[in-house]
Structures are given as C-alpha cells and as structure tokens.
C-alpha cells in the first residue's frame, strides 16, 4: 500500500498570534528559575520588583531587543530571564540530582556514563527516506489486516538495510524517525496489546534518561513552552488559593512544579506584608502505573521538590500512588482531598499511556478547578488505522528531530534524546494508546463532560515572548480555539490547553 507523506488530514486553520498588550501576570515579574534559600535570605527585605513598563514590553514585541533596557535584576524579572540567554541564576534544577546512594567510585563512574553520538552511515549505504517510510506503512497496513507474516518480511528486510537508531544527526530526520518506527512495529508484532515499554531497569537507565531530559531542556524551547504555559494557566485558575493539591499523571522528574511553587510563595510574601499569614501548602500527588517510573526517579523527584519547597519556606507534601483506571473506576484510596484544598490536574494526552475514557472519569470525580492538558507528540488521534497512525507518528517524530537539529544541539545530546525520549514515545504511541483512545482526545474531553477554558492574554503574550527569544528561526506560536501550540515550520510540536468540569 504505497503512501505519500503529503497524504492525510489537512489541519484546521490556525490563527497566528498577534502582538499582545502589556502582560499583567505575576509570572512576568518573576524569574522562572527560583532562587535558593540563601538568596532569599539575602533579599528578604528587598521590595517587590517593579512591573515591566509598556515601553519595554513594546520594544521586545517589536523585535528591537537593543531598545529594551530592562533595569530590573536578573533574579526577579521573568522577561529579563528570557531575554538574557547568558543569565546564570542559582536555582532549582530538577535535572541535577544528588549523587547516587552509593559511595563506590566505580558505581559513581557508571552513573555518569553518557551515550556517545553514533557513527554516520557510509555514503553507499544511503537509503531514500520516503521509500523506507512507504515500506513501513505497507508493513503497518498488513499488520492491521492480520497479515503478520507479510509485515514481518518487510520489517526483516528493512532491519538488514536500516541500522538501529540513533543514526546520528548527519542522517535525514525522516530516515531517523523511520528507524524508530521500524523498531516499534517489530515490537508491536511480538508484544501483546496494551503492553508498552517497561520501566527503566537500572540506576544507569535512570541516569541516562535524566541526562536526556536535561539535554532536551537545554536545546529545545518545547520544554519551556509547555512548562511556562501550564504554570500560567494554573495561576489564572487558582487565583489566590493557599492550599493547592496538584495531581500529576506524568510526573517525570517534577520539573514543571518549581515555577508554580515560586509564584505561590511570592503571593504569600506580598500578602504577609499587610497581615501575618501562614505559608501556602502545596501537595503533589503523582499517579503512576507500576511500569511507568523507576523508584529512583520518584525518590529524586520527591527529594528535589521537597528541598526546593523548604528553601522557599512553603509547606510541601509529595505522594506517589499506583494508578490503573482500567481496573478501578474510582480514584485511588490514597488520593485524598483535604477540606479547603483546590485541586489541579496535569494530564498528558496520547503517547503518555495514561489517557483514556476511564482516566477522564476518574479525574472528573476529583472535581478539579482546572485540568491542564499537554500534548507534546503532535498526534491528536489514536482512533485511526495503524498505517495512518504510523504515518502521523513518523511525521511528528521527523519534525521533532528536524527542530532539534536546527537548534545546533551537540550530536551526543541528540543521541541521548533519541534513545531515551523519542524511542519510548514512539513505542507508546504504537503499542499502547491506540487501544485506549476510541476518539480524538479533544472529543473524549467533551464526551466526559469537560469544556475548554479560554486562555488569558498573559499566557499568549508569554508564549510569544519566549519564542521570540529563541535564537533558532522557524519556531512560532499559534492559537487554535482554546489551545496554544508551538510549531516548527508547519508541524506541531507541543499543544497546551485547559479544561474544566
């Protein structure tokens, strides 16, 4: 079944963001990299930073970077932090955990090992990417129609011609994405339905996965876009809440929660200037499946977030709860909402292995004030035929790799991202989520009784400012209905939306 990469659904028209008025969000007046306890102690008596003037903001949005002389300190101005790529802020870094709990020098050396960039293919081994993709789509079509033998024959031929990923940044992004798709299709033919990739099995796996996430955060604006936009949506919905219970179905290393903690701590300090108030209380509950996170990942996440909250002087609690919505239609008993707590949910979409109608029913029972949804896969549907779904996956993966190459990321960093982030993502997209998503994820939200929340002007202006600061041309922000999307050229990389019961 030959196919063409230009086939497929035409995306709905998207509205490019226009210049936004001066933002009023507190996030603009604070750095997203929070200070440590020592810096807080030395500046506790300092007045709150002055909001950015309309003139400064206009100069930034007009592209005249030199005409925006910001007088605020780098530690206290969110916009200044974005504008100054060389700013060094002593801050929480979830990607720099303490050394492993082992003092053996040999074990520490293993912990710090990094995968090296793979060798390039020889010139006589060059493969035409589109031809390879056509063969993969034919294999997917045969697998979907029950001809597993024919699918294996095609994949076996490709297995001899196409090396295992990562192939290296010298190869076309489409060919590298095809290698990941081939491996996932091979696993699909031998893996029972509903069984995706397993948890990292060793200390070294966790260390390399953490290094890959750090490399992606350093190289691509996708991480900051998702994190800052999500934080702003939460601040808009939570208002002045002082007891916040965040339920996260994709905790990772917890990197998205320090900015929220910092903003709540800032609100508390400002309010305490008029009347003495107890510190805010932040509870983070990570809902994890048994095979989704290594215990060491959860330990590092808990320890880092707790240490950072202590530096801020806010009350913090962390819980990790095993969650399987397919076996229990009710929230886990360990997830309890105390009186006066405002609940916010972070829910990833397709590719996370957790998004399903059953998950949405459980989330609705928690009566959250807001559900922030992050789609960082560029694939909005899991209800398509396998060949069409595979085409969407290889398209989004190729766009992701192309954008990463364009940033000039080092070859070894790209290799880590491919091996420990992209490869598991492609595998989950093919092996797990198609079984869990009978409809497009936006339709599933609406069917479960959720309605989209209109994004604030501050969220839009913040996203646009972040992309303007990105030195690599080609990234841009689009608003589609009630969502913000970060795109590379014409391909969507990340979409952030908010929903309410």
Image: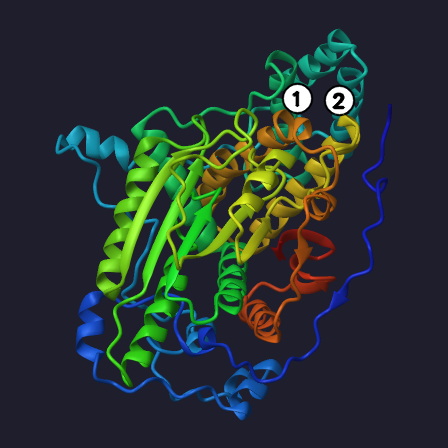
Q: Identify the image quadrant of residue 358.
A: top right
**Is any part of residue 115 visible from this angle?**
no
The quadrant in which the N terminus is found is top right
Q: In the rendered image, which residue does mark 1 sit on?
A: 185
Residue 78 or residue 412, whichever sits in front: 78
Q: Which residue is mark 2?
A: 140
Left-right relation of 164 to 136: left
Q: Quarter-wise, where is residue 268 in the image?
A: bottom left
Count neighbours of disc 2 (C-alpha within 10 A) and say few if under 14, some if 14 to 19, many if 20 or more.
many
User: Does 483 sit above or below residue 442?
Assistant: below
Q: How many numbered marks does the figure carry?
A: 2
Above or below, 422 relative to 452:
above
**Residue density around tag 1, few if under 14, some if 14–19, many if 20 or more, within 10 Å:** many
Secondary element at image label 2: helix
Residue situated furthest front in the rendering: 339
Q: Where's residue 81, x and y in %? A: 42, 73
- Way the structure is coloured: rainbow
Asked whether the residues under the numbered discs 2 and 1 touch, taking CB atoms below 8 Å apart as contact, a structural biologist would say: yes
């Amino acid at each position: 079944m030959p196919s063409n990469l230009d086939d497929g659904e035409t995306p709905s028209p998207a509205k490019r963001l226009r210049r936004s008025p001066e933002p009023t969000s507190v996030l603009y007046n604070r750095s997203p990299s929070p200070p440590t306890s020592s810096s807080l102690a030395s500046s506790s008596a300092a007045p709150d930073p002055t909001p950015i003037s309309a003139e400064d903001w206009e100069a930034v949005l007009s592209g005249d970077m030199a005409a925006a002389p910001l007088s605020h300190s780098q530690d206290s101005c969110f916009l200044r932090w974005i504008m100054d790529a060389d700013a060094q802020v002593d801050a929480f870094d979830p990607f720099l955990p303490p050394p492993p709990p082992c003092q053996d020098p040999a074990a520490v050396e293993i912990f710090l090992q990094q995968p090296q960039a793979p060798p390039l293919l020889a010139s006589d081994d060059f493969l035409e990417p589109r031809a390879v993709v056509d063969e993969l789509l034919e294999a997917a079509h045969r697998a979907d129609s029950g001809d597993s033998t024919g699918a294996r024959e095609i994949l076996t031929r490709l297995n001899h011609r196409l090396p295992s990923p990562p192939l290296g940044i010298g190869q076309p992004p489409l060919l590298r994405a095809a290698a990941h798709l081939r491996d996932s299709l091979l696993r699909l033919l031998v893996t029972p339905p509903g069984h995706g990739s397993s948890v990292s099995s060793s200390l070294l796996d966790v260390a390399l996965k953490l290094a890959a996430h750090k490399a992606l955060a350093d190289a691509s604006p996708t991480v900051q876009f998702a994190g800052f936009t999500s934080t702003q949506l939460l601040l808009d919905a939570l208002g002045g809440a002082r007891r916040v219970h965040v339920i996260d179905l994709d905790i990772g290393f917890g990197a998205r929660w320090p900015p929220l903690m910092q903003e709540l701590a800032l609100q508390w300090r400002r309010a305490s200037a008029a009347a003495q108030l107890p510190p805010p209380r932040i509870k983070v509950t990570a809902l994890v499946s048994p095979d989704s996170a290594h215990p060491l990942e959860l330990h590092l996440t808990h320890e880092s977030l707790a240490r950072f909250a202590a530096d801020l002087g806010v009350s913090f609690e962390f819980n990790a709860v095993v969650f399987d919505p397919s076996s229990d239609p009710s929230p886990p008993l360990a997830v309890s909402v105390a009186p006066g707590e405002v609940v916010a949910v972070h829910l990833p979409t397709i590719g996370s292995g957790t998004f399903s109608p059953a998950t949405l029913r459980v989330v609705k029972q928690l009566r959250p004030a807001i559900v922030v949804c992050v789609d960082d896969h560029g694939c909005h549907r899991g209800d398509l035929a396998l060949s069409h779904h595979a085409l969407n996956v290889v398209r989004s993966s190729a766009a992701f790799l192309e954008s990463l190459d364009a940033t000039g990321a080092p070859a070894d960093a790209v290799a880590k991202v491919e091996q420990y982030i992209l490869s598991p993502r492609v595998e989950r997209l093919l092996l797990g989520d198609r079984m869990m998503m009978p409809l497009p994820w936006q339709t599933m939200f609406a069917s479960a009784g959720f309605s989209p929340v209109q994004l604030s002007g501050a969220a839009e202006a913040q996203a646009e400012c972040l992309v303007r600061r990105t030195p690599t041309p080609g990234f841009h922000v689009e608003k589609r209905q009630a969502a913000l999307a970060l795109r590379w050229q014409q391909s969507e990389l990340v979409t952030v939306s908010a929903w309410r019961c």
